[in-house]
Image (cartoon, rainbow, N blue to C red):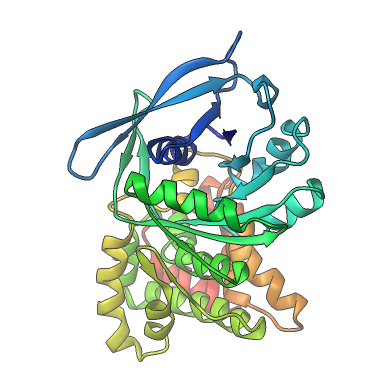
Amino acid sequence: MTDLVVGGGAIGTLLAWALATGGRDVAIVRRGLDGRPRAADAVVVDLDGSRRTAAVTEVGAPGGLRAAPDVIVFAVKMYDLDSAVASCAVWPNAASLTPGNGIGAEEILERLRPNAPVVAGSLTVSVDRLADGDVRRLNRGGVGLAAVRGEATALISALADASNRSGIRAATFADWQAMKWSKLVANLVGNASSAILDMAPDAIYASAAGFEVERRQLREALAVMRRLDLRAVRLPGADVRLLAAGVRLPAFVSRPILRRVVAAGRGGKDPSLRIAARTESERSEVRWLNGAVAREAERLGGNAPVNRRLTDLVEELLTDDDRRAFLRGRPDRLAQEILRS
């Protein structure tokens, strides 16, 4: 059977390449493709500069497959997930894999695909999409996999085996929520603040004011995890347990350590929210990142004011150039905006 990857960006191409390199039959949706399915290559430029190619099939739409896929990988941004799921209604019983960032994808799949197994994924590989469509790998991260609903043990094992054979380390987890919330904590680091300040994360951590905002947002997220009785886990390439321990230390101890970790964590790539802000997109995934922390805290009867304010600021600055200019490069102003609330 075929694995179907919906989303032809950097992450979708990487996952299609990894599964195909690991020996699986993979198709990837290329919007606008006319005619019959066609053979193509997925190319990843590895850390040593070598180009590694895997044979895949390209289709113009999910219905272009001749038979139901074994699994559908929804490698799209959270704000595009509903429409991506709707496009796969032709295969209602195929298992689904959600490798995207943030909280809420699995619940969307459970609601829109009630008869299909759901597998949660957490990807810690940092990649860039090159001008020619190839993907460049930037770090040695991997992928975490966990069952959400339905019998998926054999599928998860097969996907993990294929990923490991490709050189993308895979780990499986018993608790999918602990895995996804751990990845969320990792995604929060230097992300919203980088979008607001238009600064690199390590420069933000070099500022006492910027670090205090960062530390408080992470502490809020970890407090929500404790309320949910979830423990931070060690993801491939990202031991979130160490990050959780680090933010509890005094600032004069933790700031220089975390600054070095943050500088190396993404392989030099900008955080996702800063990329969206720099491209002047009016859409952002912040509501599924910091916004998810704030919503869950409020659902549990508490609050997460730093994450709530960061969410509001990121969305505000997407359409307000004056506010963006006021905060650009000024962690002190951000701290005043955040910590006074």
Q: Is residue 273 visible?
A: no
In this view of the protein, which residue sits in the foreground, 184 or 250? 184
Residue beneath the point at 58% across and 65% down = 290
Residue at 67% x, 81% y: name it.
228
> Which percent across, then down, holds residue 325?
45, 51
Q: Quadrant of the N terminus?
A: top right
Looking at the image, can residue 237 be seen?
Answer: yes
Q: Position of residue 255 (x, y in %)?
A: 30, 80
* Residue drawn at point x = 61 percent, y = 78 percent: 341
Farthest top residue in view: 35
- Image location (x, y in percent) of residue 186: 45, 66
Question: Measured along the vertical axis of the image, is residue 98 above or below residue 206?
Answer: above
Q: Nearer the viewer, residue 255 or 24?
A: 24
Tell me the residue at 26%/78% (across/down).
257
Residue furthest to the left: 48
Q: In the visual, does 295 lie left or right of 55?
A: right
> Which quadrant would residue 264 be assigned to in this image?
bottom left
Figure disc tally:
0
Relative vertical location of residue 254 with respect to residue 82 in this rendering, above or below: below
- Residue 277 is situated, as x and y percent measured from the top left of the image, at 49, 46
**148 sits left or right of 47 in the view:** right
